Image (spheres, rainbow, N blue to C red):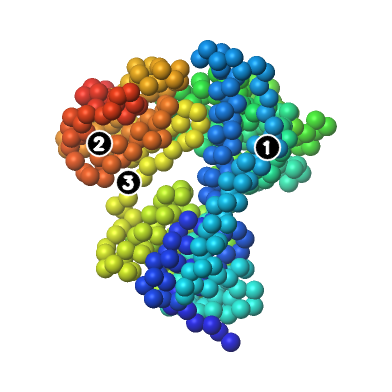
Amino acid sequence: MTQSFDAIIVGAGQAGPSLAGRLTAAGMTVALIERKLIGGTCVNTGCMPTKALVASAYAAHLARRGADFGVNTGPVSVDMKKVRARADTVSTNARTNNETWLRGMERLTLIMGHARFTGPDTMEVDGRAITAPRIFLNVGGRANVPDFPGVNDVDYLNNVSILKLDTLPEHLVVVGGSYIGLEFAQMYRRFGAKVTIVEKGPRLIAREDEDVSEAMREIMEAEGITVRTGAECISFAPHRDGIEVGVDCTSGSPTEIGSHALLAVGRRPNTDDLGLDVAGIETDARGYIKVDDRLATNVPGIWAMGDCNGRGAFTHTAYNDFEIAAANLLDGADRKLSDRILGYALYTDPPLGRVGMSESEARKSGRKLLVSKRPMTRVGRAIEKSETQGFMKIVADADTRKILGAAILGTGGDEAIHGILDMMNADVDYGVLQWAVPIHPTVSELIPTVLGDLKPAE
């Protein structure tokens, strides 16, 4: 017997539960299917536990610097069991709250199990057949594991399994010098481990401008982290002291011996076991579900939200996917993905706040540009906190006087970037923000000054 609903949502990550709330409030019956943990990546293995770890690592770092502020703390040690327990508590509480909310939701049926398509409007969940005229896929993603030589011969860590560690690695080798890798590298160095970053490319966080990459490398190395870029011969082999990671064939030590190795080399969508072919749903070469500007797939009545559609890899973009889908379906709106101005942050210390185009992307666009850059050493708030690493940079269109993008690598950068993001969403002349009167002493107060220094790009 097939059970009918008004809508099926597959995946209880960021977009799914919120959409279920809107649909059920509109009177629809909804089946929400989750095969593992309510809350998805963010709550269970992403933002919440990792940022809890970042907070613990920052506390350890600040305690060691106590004397710089006239505070005598004595020897600093880190209890990794308590660190892990705190992160677990943060995740568990969020997951429990989400699940309690969903289980009390009227007209919602929460089904725990793995869903697969049996047709364009039907699915099976562990032998249970369900159907609906509207199906929303919110299945997320997981760590990518490239076919490195020997990778299957060692017990490597990924962003999920490393959260289970309650002991300190003697030497953590992080393979991948981008967002996830950098956050874990810095936090484990601050916990007390020896850390080496191995990156195949010529620089860290390659999607960012070169000056951001260079500054980030300086930040990592200043904390005693070894950075190995240009690692063209990455391989793995068991070693009596842990794991031997092949790094480079031409310069430097050809290998790094780590007690632990973390693979942080990107993500892949959880789309390979949904039976998408049965429903006729198209994916791209990497497995991401193809969607149009309103999140619809090529099959009428099926939408894809969150990480699995390849149109955003963040909790906030997944939530915005929900907002777009709900507004268009229930509010008679015409919201589009192309209206979204992307902002994101890298949660190293100091953090990197980013919005819109990088300078290199703007240059490739062929526009006449205005660029301004100011070091954090000239930000009063940063000086007062003795956290002066990094810089602020804004790129604008010289003809339209609209801000194209910005980077704030510095203390508070993940928060201060929102002033620029809001101006970009308002689509106004940058002079509006230039003549704002921000509060002193803050990081944001320097933004009007940076705007006032915009000059033609060389």
Quadrant of the rendering where the C terminus is positioned: top left
Residue 396 visible in the displayed image: yes
| Residue type highlighted by circle 3 | Ile
Quadrant of the rendering where the N terminus is positioned: bottom right
The percent coordinates of residue 280 (x first, y second) are: 48, 72
Q: Nearer the viewer, residue 231 or 334?
A: 334
Q: Vertically, is 298 above or below 385?
A: below
What separation in Å lies between label 2 and label 1 (alpha carbons)? 44 Å
The percent coordinates of residue 113 (x first, y second) are: 62, 68
Residue 44 visible in the displayed image: no
What is the secondary structure assignment of the residue under circle 2? strand
Q: Nearer the viewer, residue 67 or 8?
A: 67
Q: Which residue is mark 1?
A: 82
Left or right, residue 110 beside residue 433: right
Q: How packed is label 3: few (under 14 Cα within 10 Å), some, or many (20 or more)?
A: some
| Residue type highlighted by circle 1 | Lys
Left or right, residue 275 beside residue 170: left
Q: Are marks 2 and 3 in contact (CB under 8 Å)?
A: no
The circle drawn on residue 403 is: 2
Q: How packed is label 2: few (under 14 Cα within 10 Å), some, or many (20 or more)?
A: many
Callout count: 3
Q: Which residue is mark 3?
A: 341
Q: Residue at x 75, y 43 (%)?
A: 155
Disc number lying in front (2 or 1): 1
What is the secondary structure assignment of the residue under circle 3? loop
The percent coordinates of residue 92 (x first, y second) are: 60, 51
Which quadrant would residue 329 be assigned to in this image?
bottom left
What separation in Å lies between label 2 and label 3 (alpha carbons)? 11 Å
Q: Residue at x 42, y 23 (%)?
A: 390
